[in-house]
Image: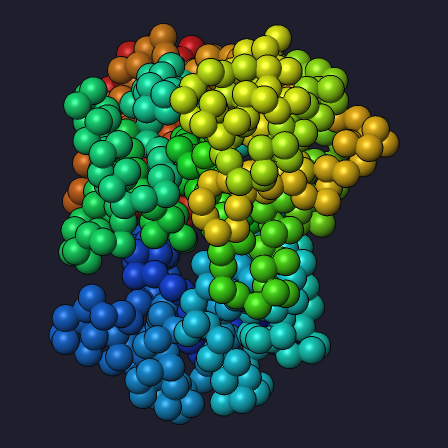
Amino acid sequence: MAAGGDALVLMPTGGGKSLCYQIPALVREGVAVVVSPLIALMEDQVSALRQQGVAAAALHSGLDPAARSRIEADLHGGTLKLLYVAPERLLGSDLLQRLSRLPVALFAIDEAHCVSQWGHDFRPEYLQLGILGERFPTVPRLALTATADRRTRAEIARQLLPDTARTFISSFDRPNLRYHIGLKQRPREQLLRFIQERHAGNSGIVYCMSRRATEQIADWLNARDIPALAYHAGLEASQRQAHQTRFLREDGLIMVATVAFGMGIDKPDVRFVAHLDLPKSLEAYYQETGRAGRDGLPADAWLVYGLQDIYRVRQMSAASEASEDHKRGEHQRLEALLGFCEATGCRRPPLLAHFDESHAGACGNCDNCLAPPATRDATDAARRALSCVYRTGQRFGAGHVIDVLTGGNSERVRELGHDRLSTWGIGRDIARPVWQSIIRQLLAHGMLAPDPGGHGGLQLTEACRPLLRGEARITLREDTIQPGASTRRSRSPGDDWQGDPDSWAALRAERRRLAEEAGVPPYVIFHDATLAAMLERRPRTLEEMADVPGVGATKLERYGEAFLAALAALPSTSGA
């Protein structure tokens, strides 16, 4: 990129994508224009760059006229090295005309997956960015994203880059993330137990499907002394911005949100991402869970789901008014997600396979590796369930099918005559919760499908024929309620200092003080990992402080003395 080439860059969240355009921007002549979808993301990047002494600015709708004029003057004066701008502002104003009269170092298109209608964060404005190649044919272009399967990558390259662009793909694996997936049952209590046992006092994100649920869960957590905020598209823009700002700048705050929150959130110390509903696709799940552990330190991706979640996502897919080709693509994405959730082996092979990356398994950092689930040959039970769905007419939901299987004597069963069917009572030997598990897994395996009309009935699919004919067998997992058998608390950067928590708290307090003075989030001063390294190394001079990972020349000059003083005030035996 520094030499003037075009490129598509795919790197995991927290893997250093920004450096791929920030370094070339500093060595090339002119201003680098970074297209970014969110004001908060732009402001975070600009704050971090300014802390490093880099001339950067963001043009967006939240600026007052005076601030906008200052940035435009710096742009035309040649003092800016990086200019962040939303696609709408870049294309919908005279900015392109202004840039045509200036030396432009490069165009970087961040969150480039937004260009793809196959992706999970489609933004129509991104489709118009192809004009950059027409207006600035000699200026290199860089498209970057953390999440794109093969089809989305092809769409990015076709829409945004010339045929000669090179592709650079880093590993999608996030070894520091621990994946936990379990059966949904009393999800609020499950979430509360997870937070209390593993992440007390940590920052995290909880994703819910509906706006109402975000507010209810946030209120419920607050009532239990866990600070939480709600975030969804129905809130006033000023309130959304206020909540996002608090989340970025405060420690130990939980954001309960719909998917309207999160793209590009650059808070490195998010220690967990929890899902109380199934995401739309495995790609969306990877993007959303990637907001945890951006600092490379241990973090959790936690999800609970149940039969109704599978009903919902399958019905949404079937009811879509998109083209058949698009619906087939969405169906494949859904199958990948459900296959990942129901996997009995290591979570990483099916997750990474979705991004065309292989993994040997046995990662040692997912629920299935840490506590391998029990499985059973469920061929006979599955055949009984499928036969009952067929005998009852393929128009009833799981509850009624299980009533018939277990010999229920309800008025509805008698009125329909289903107590006279050959499948009535053939499942009395299996408990109702187990039948729910079997039907859920048959839905996940694609052998059952919900009524496309949205009435909740179950129907057989072609995929179940080999099983019913005796040509195939099926192994299903034994459900556990709490995701992850271990309740051991995830390690955080301060865990090595739990014997002397005052030392850890003192450095964080000093960081918070400096952050408030500078008007930036605490992590912009130093990441948690840098504070932990300070406690381990105990530098006593600026020269020793300069050797601490994460302390660059500019931050050493600005904050070195303050942290040396804070360290000197700690008991001399702390951390020894």
Quadrant including the C terminus: top left
Q: Residue at x 50, y 21 (%)?
A: 403
Q: Is residue 576 left or right of residue 256?
A: right
User: Which residue is nearer to you in this view: 572 or 165?
Assistant: 165
Q: Residue at x 56, y 30 (%)?
A: 440
Percent x, y for residue 532? 41, 26
Percent x, y for residue 203? 33, 32
- The colouring scheme, among rainbow, by chain, secondary structure or one colour, is rainbow
Q: Residue at x 20, y 20 (%)?
A: 224
Q: Is residue 541 shown above or below 259?
A: above
User: Which residue is nearer to you in this view: 124 or 448?
Assistant: 448
Q: Is residue 519 shown above or below 67?
A: above
Quadrant including the N terminus: bottom right
User: Which residue is nearer to you in this view: 349 or 4?
Assistant: 349
Percent x, y for residue 528? 38, 32
* Number of numbered discs: 0
Q: Is residue 363 left or right of residue 393?
A: right
Percent x, y for residue 562? 25, 34
Q: Residue furthest right?
A: 471
Q: Is residue 223 shown above or below 429?
A: below
Is residue 449 visible to us here?
yes
Residue 379 quadrant: top right
Is residue 293 visible to us here?
no
Residue 499 quadrant: top left
Q: Is residue 248 shown above or below 328?
A: above
